[in-house]
Image (cartoon, rainbow, N blue to C red):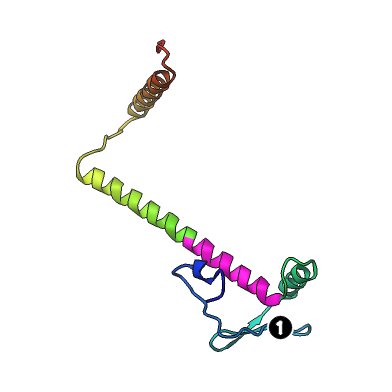
């Protein structure tokens, strides 16, 4: 497996037997052979970005630009999936708390204000304890 391919994550792993990639100056297509040949059609702007990245030495050729773009796309998808997993777990924890009766009802603006004051007071008390300073009311 080429270096860096193992990092692609569970969404997609590309095993390149042979890669042939050329940007056609007229059609802006990129022929790529993975296990089969795929043709990518690029806009003028996309083709120009690839040309500039190769021309300024950032990448050796168009295939390296495509490889990096795919690697970053897969990494972003993995990151997004991990974030969703965290959100799902937090939602489940909230639902579990509700089912277990660990919640409070706020039925009026006064209830919300009172909760806000309790949270502020508790935060100030914790801060004072951390600073080892007496809390002043």
- Above-or-below relation of 50 to 82: below
Q: x%, y% of residue 63?
A: 66, 77
> Magenta stretch mostly in which secondary structure?
helix
40 or 114: nearer the viewer: 40
Q: Is residue 47 left or right of residue 98?
A: right
Residue highlighted by disc 1: 22
Q: Which corner quadrant of the image does residue 114 belong to?
A: top left
Q: x%, y% of residue 57?
A: 77, 67
Residue closest to the far bottom: 36
Residue located 50% across and 64% down the image = 77
Within the magenta stretch, is there residue 73?
Answer: yes
Within the magenta stretch, is there residue 38?
Answer: no
Q: Is residue 70 left or right of residue 93?
A: right
Residue located 78% across and 85% down the image = 26
Other residues around mark 1 within 10 Å, as few (<14) / some (14–19) / many (≥20) = some
24 or 98: nearer the viewer: 24
Q: Is residue 73 left or right of residue 83?
A: right
Range covered by the magenta-colored residues: 62-78
Q: x%, y% of residue 101?
A: 20, 40
Q: Which corner quadrant of the image does residue 131 belong to?
A: top left
Residue located 30% across and 46% down the image = 94
Residue located 48% across and 58% down the image = 79
Q: Quadrant of the C terminus?
A: top left
Q: x%, y% of residue 9?
A: 47, 67
Q: Secondary structure at mark 1?
A: loop
Q: Which corner quadrant of the image does residue 135 belong to?
A: top left
């Amino acid at each position: 497996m080429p270096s860096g391919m193992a990092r692609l994550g569970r969404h997609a792993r590309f095993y390149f037997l042979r890669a042939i990639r050329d940007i056609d100056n007229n059609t802006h297509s990129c022929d790529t052979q993975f296990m089969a040949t795929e043709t990518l059609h690029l806009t003028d702007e996309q083709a120009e970005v690839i040309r500039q990245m190769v021309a300024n030495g950032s990448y050796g050729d168009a295939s390296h630009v495509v490889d990096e773009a795919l690697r970053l796309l897969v990494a972003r998808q993995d990151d997004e999936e991990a974030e969703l997993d965290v959100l799902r777990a937090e939602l489940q924890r909230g639902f579990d708390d509700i089912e277990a009766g660990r919640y409070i009802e706020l039925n009026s603006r006064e209830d919300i204000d009172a909760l806000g004051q309790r949270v502020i007071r508790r935060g100030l008390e914790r801060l004072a304890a951390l600073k080892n300073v007496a809390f002043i009311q």
